[in-house]
Image: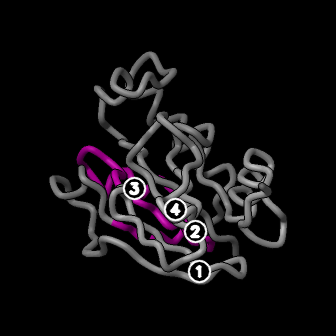
């Protein structure tokens, strides 16, 4: 079983294409691409941590089309649809790290080793908290419209930020 992290599919949300400059001609093509990319790598027994904004509406319709066992964290758009979650955040230990999962970066915490977020779409992929804690955007807009594993997240972060492989200490 593999664990995946992602957010901001916005399935069925036509205007998200324009808002986030997504490279799709229409919402049908966007939905089909995201679903195909998801199912290409996520198997039925894999776990998907979904950090908010799954769909515009019709949750059951879209959920039936996607592989994996989902753990949903509420996003700002999920307050107005039928995504079945009451979680605003979660803390997990994975890959030897204590990781905080939340949708909006304004809700990150400082007493973990890494924060995973969504919500910011194409604006940035990696950031740091005020105390230097890594903040990684797992949204599909910056991960080629597919979910990612923690290993992919760590590899990308290390490559981009010049971080030691055994931890998240930035070289000075």
Residue 140 sits above or below residue 75 on the image: above
Q: Are marks 2 and 1 in contact (CB under 8 Å)?
A: yes
| Label 3 neighbour load within 10 Å: few <14, some 14-19, many 20+ | some
Label 4: state its secondary structure: strand
Residue 18 lies, in percent from the top left, at: 35, 20
- Whichever of labels 4 and 1 marks the residue nearer the N terminus, that label is 1
- Whichever of labels 1 and 3 marks the residue nearer the N terminus, that label is 1
Q: Which residue is drawn at the image coordinates 30% and 63% (left, top)?
A: 74
Looking at the image, which residue sits at the far left? Answer: 80
Residue 4 sits above or below residue 29 on the image: below
Q: CA distance from mark 3 to mark 2?
A: 12 Å
Quickly name the residue at label 3: 105
Magenta region, residue range: 45-73
- Whichever of labels 3 and 2 marks the residue nearer the N terminus, that label is 3
Quickly name the residue at label 1: 98
Q: Are marks 2 and 4 in contact (CB under 8 Å)?
A: yes
Label 2: state its secondary structure: strand
Quickly name the residue at label 2: 114
């Amino acid at each position: 079983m593999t664990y995946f992290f992602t957010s901001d599919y916005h399935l069925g949300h036509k205007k998200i294409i324009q808002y986030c400059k997504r490279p799709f001609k229409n919402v049908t093509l966007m939905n089909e691409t995201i679903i195909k990319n998801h199912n290409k790598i996520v198997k039925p027994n894999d776990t998907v941590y979904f950090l908010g904004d799954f769909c515009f509406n019709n949750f059951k319709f879209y959920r039936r089309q996607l592989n994996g066992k989902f753990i949903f964290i509420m996003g700002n758009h999920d307050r107005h649809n039928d995504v079945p979650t009451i979680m605003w955040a979660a803390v997990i230990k994975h890959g030897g790290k204590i990781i905080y999962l939340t949708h909006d970066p304004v809700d990150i915490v400082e007493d973990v080793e890494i924060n995973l977020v969504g919500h910011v779409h194409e604006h940035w992929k990696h950031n740091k908290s005020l105390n230097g804690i890594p903040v990684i955007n797992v949204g599909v807009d910056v991960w080629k419209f597919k979910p990612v594993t923690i290993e992919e997240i760590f590899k990308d972060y290390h490559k981009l930020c010049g971080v030691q492989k055994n931890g998240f200490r930035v070289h000075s």
